[in-house]
Amino acid sequence: MIDLSAAPTLDRLLPMLCETAMDIHLDVYLVGGVIRDLLLRRSTVDFDFAVEGDAIEFTRELAARHGGTLTMHPTFRTATWSYQELEIDFATARTETYPEPAMLPVVTPASIDLDLYRRDFTINALALRLNEPRQLIDLYGGQEDLRSGIIRVLHDHSFIDDPTRLFRAVRFEQRLNFHIEPHTFSLIAPALPYVSRLSGERLRYEFELIFSEDEPEKSLHRLHDLGLLTYLDSGLIFDETLYNAFRSYRLLAADQQYAQNSWHIKTNSAINIGWALLGSRTRDPEQMARRLMLDRTATLAVHGGQRIAKLLDKVASAQKPSEVDALLNDLPTEVLVAGSVLASGDTRAKVTAYATTWRYVTPLLSGKDFTNWGLSPGPLFGKLLRGLRTARLDGQISSLEQEREFVQRVIAQMAADDATGEDA
Ligand code: CTP
């Protein structure tokens, strides 16, 4: 039976749900990936419940008994119950029919058996009935497939109905170190043409999920082998450098202190770094952004990835920090991360130094100091500040005193130049 000790939240929650379900004569089930993860003893954070009957009626009763707030979606007969620190989704058990391949399905309330049959893979078509006697429902051999490490669809039309499942199959396969069983594998090639019918939003979401995996490079590599990456861009090159770049990024991000404090990488940066890395290898960033309906930041990441990949040779031959600064100065953090992990050796060291240190270099003196010295604000201030920064970057000056001397020298030089100009 299922061991809930790995999920203390569930241990606390299930008796409440069970009691309510029994009292109002509804059957409630914990369903989907959470059962898979509990059986595999993997940590799990998302809990999905299915209610035979009406999820909204059930959650109303829960909220009436235990408090918390409800967000209801009457069209889909689903509800989210916000209770203490939790947000829990309840869906009415349903069957789905696809009016056309790759379109969103039409849903109709149904029994749990049909609800499980509409799902993607046997390992995700497991349910735990909460009503007493508690019972694991495994109609399609999910437990056996979990034991054998197999990804198996429930019916032959599954990938065509919902081509996002091609990406999901690869993601679960790589995440769990499973393999796609031969018959399921044979259904992939006939479903490939349907990927182009997916909306940009749905396709994009699959990649965002992949970028958020622990080892995205493994899924991307497999997608590449299966010909699925061409749906982003027919010329996308998934080479060893890109594979290693995803890996290097993962290692960098694993040191959270370094990633946050030195790189200023935010916790949700993985997705835009993923876009920047794919952008570095796309033939047409514009087309990729349009196909996937990327938002502004992700679009900038794709374009930035493309740009920094082309700049790496110049970075390699740059002699001074200020030259690197001039090449990289308008690129966002995510793109700099991508550039660094795409590069190697000395070039990586330069991009890293720029991203973590050089770009934050500023002179100690400011325009206020120049005004205090009697200079009038104008283009000269910009020139002095830029000059100070360049000199600091390249290690020519490092103290306040040296900055003052630098400014005096520049002003003296300008005065001399003016005098020469007047004389002439
Ligand atoms: N599902 C499906 N087909 C899809 C998406 C989802 O059948 N295209 C079903 C699966 O049963 C899945 C459940 O809906 O387990 C919940 O979906 P999701 O939260 O995306 O999947 P999880 O299995 O929870 O995966 P993850 O561990 O990545 O969150």
Image (tube, grey):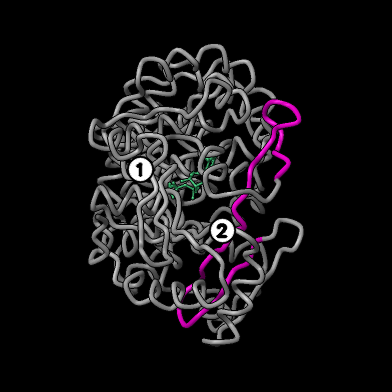
Which disc, if any, is residue 331?
A: none
- Residues 202 and 182: in front is 182
**Residue stretch in magenta:** 78-107
Where is residue 227 drawn, in percent x and y?
Answer: 49, 15
Q: Quadrant of residue 292?
A: top right
Magenta segment's dominant SS is strand
Q: Secondary structure at mark 2?
A: helix
Decide whether residue 96 is among the magenta residues. Answer: yes
Query: On the image, numbered disc 1 is attached to which residue?
Result: 351
- Residues 120 and 172: in front is 120
Query: On the image, numbered disc 2 is attached to which residue?
Result: 383
Where is residue 164 drawn, in percent x and y?
Answer: 56, 33
Q: Which sits earlier in the primary sequence, circle 2 or circle 1?
A: 1
Left/right of residue 251 with respect to residue 14 in the rendered view: left
Left/right of residue 329 with respect to residue 79 in the rendered view: left
Measuring 35% from the left and 43% from the top, which residue is drawn there? 351
Measuring 27% from the left and 64% from the top, which residue is drawn there? 4
